[in-house]
Image: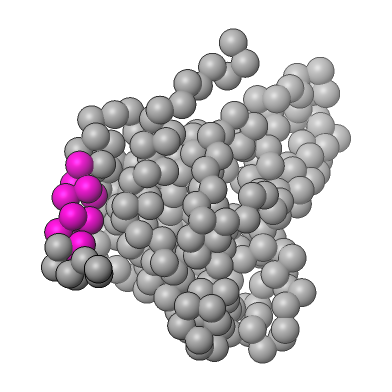
Amino acid sequence: MEVPRIISDRAYSTYESMIEKEVSSGVMPRHIAVIMDGNRRYAEEVLGADPVEGHMLGRKKLEEVLHWCLDLDIHVLTVYAFSTENFNREASEVDYLMDLLEKSLYEFADDEEVHNRKVAVHVIGDREMLPDNVIKAMEYAEERTGMYTENRLNMAIAYSGRQDIVAAVRSIARDAVEGSLSPEEIDESTVSRYISTGDLPDPDLVLRTSGEVRISNFLLWQMAYSELYFADVYWPGFRHIDFLRAIRTYQQRKRRFGK
């Protein structure tokens, strides 16, 4: 016998409230990183629609998740928006995603809630790989929100973890040649300072949607001691209760950092 919708909705709401209360009383991660995976599969398998629809819904989901983080006083959210490998997709899809990223950056930069919550929007990645319109949107977003220090939204665009490390090593080598850095001074903390997120704490929790269990060249240096969580749900279908479960799992783990 099928359970009436009103009863199932009420039960879901009660369960969600219970988890939210439990999570709110625990220690929050300072920095969450998300591999937003499954937009195309959600569109094709769930909606029976064009992949474009999945990317549009994925953009809306990012806005939701940012608000969920802010509501729980999680101050840094880093999202894998477009990898260097994504350039290997069909040209029409890449062009659409570039236009969507451009639009998203302008929207975040002008969003009233972003300014009310004092969220700095920042982009990490290889900008030389990106079209001028996206670079212009990045610069606009960073200029409009750059005065804020309370919260941060990092969008990894044209990003790869290996490229991030190579760029840091190149900068270190350049400074060593110029004499502003001694080779004997170079250690792990040096690399961490030169990495793209050097002004931030490393992610406490790295979350991936879609059921895939891999990190796909994302924040390789930064996630050395991150807790990993893999959600078996496509990114556009990622619910608030899924988010709360991820935070609860993080809170239940014992973080020893090798001790």
- Residue sitting farthest toward the right: 177
In the rendered view, tell whether residue 249 sits above or below residue 129. above
User: Any magenta on residue 9?
Assistant: yes
Q: Quadrant of residue 175?
A: top right
> Which residue: 54% across, 78% down?
45
Q: Position of residue 214 (x, y in %)?
A: 67, 49
Whether residue 253 is visible to the viewer of this picture, yes or no, is yes
Quadrant including the N terminus: bottom left
Picture layout, residue 200 above or below residue 51: above
Q: Among all residues in the image, which is located at the extreme front?
A: 1
Identify the residue at image location x=46%, y=44%. Answer: 32
Query: Tag count in the figure?
Result: 0
In the rendered image, residue 7 lying in the magenta stretch gets the answer no
Q: Is residue 59 left or right of residue 182?
A: left
User: Which residue is at 72% across, 64% downward?
Assistant: 84
Q: Does 147 appear above or below 61?
A: above
Comparing 31 with 27, the one in front is: 27
For the point 21% across and 66% down, the residue is: 3
Quadrant for the C terminus in the image: top right
- Of helix, strand and loop, which mostly describes the magenta segment? helix
**Which segment did they paint magenta?**
8-18
Coordinates of residue 90 in the picture (x, y in percent): 72, 84
Using the image, determine if residue 89 lies above or below residue 15.
below
